[in-house]
Amino acid sequence: MKQKPQLPVIGWREWVSLPDLGIENIKAKIDTGARSSAIHAFDIETFHQEGQHLVRFKVHPYQRDSIQTVATASPLFDERQVRNSGGHAELRLVILTPIEILGYQWPIELTLTNRDVMGFRMLLGRQALRQRFLVDPGKSFLLSHK
């Protein structure tokens, strides 16, 4: 019988980086119940530059801190209907960007939405985690530190 390679274990929350967006640290909730990943974004605006469809937006990377702000831009990857935690469908802009957790780096689809009232500025869903990690729901910050 063939053995599967051992996957690294992460906790239910981890510090992650989004290097292409200029976000060095943001605490993400690891949510295997959510299909897609999301980040708290505001002042979202689409524009065209040199024939490319882009989106610019701002992020407050730390919960309960509206002072530190990262202004960034990324190519627009898609627009899609996503059901929020309340079960309501909303149209969200989607970007494709690399994520990094302590040396592991890979591209993820990230939806832009207002998560200001949520407990975490970022949600890392199961599409981003699939075949990369096992999740220990009783642990936190196993692969990351701020």
Image: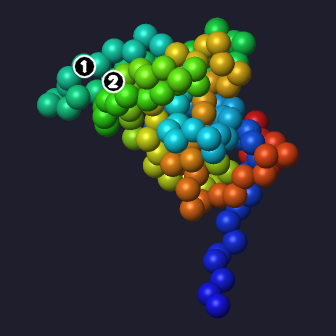
- Residue type indicated by callout 1: Phe
- Asked if the residue under mark 1 is in contact with the one under mark 2, i.e. CB atoms within 8 Å, the reply is yes
Q: Tell me the tag on residue 47.
A: 1
Name the residue: 23% across, 28% down. Answer: 53
99 vs 83: above or below: below
Q: Is residue 97 visible?
A: no
Q: Of all residues shown, which one is farthest toward the front?
A: 87
Circle 2: element type:
strand
Quarter of the rendering occupied by the C terminus: top right
Q: CA distance from mark 2 to mark 1?
A: 6 Å
Q: Position of residue 122 (x, y in %)?
A: 60, 30
**Residue sitting at the far right:** 138
Colouring scheme, one of rainbow, by chain, secondary structure, one colour: rainbow
Q: Position of residue 71 (x, y in %)?
A: 47, 19
Which residue is painted at 70% across and 62% down in the image? Answer: 8
Q: x%, y% of residue 12?
A: 75, 42
Q: Position of residue 6 (x, y in %)?
A: 69, 72
Disc 2 packing (10 Å; few <14; some 14–19; many ≥20): many
For the N terminus, the quadrant is bottom right
**Residue count near mark 1 (Cα–Cα under 10 Å), binned few <14, some 14–19, many ≥20:** few
Amino acid at dot 2: Val
Secondary structure beneath dot 1 equals strand
Q: Earlier in the sequence, mark 2 or mark 1?
A: 1
Q: Which residue is the site of mark 2?
A: 55
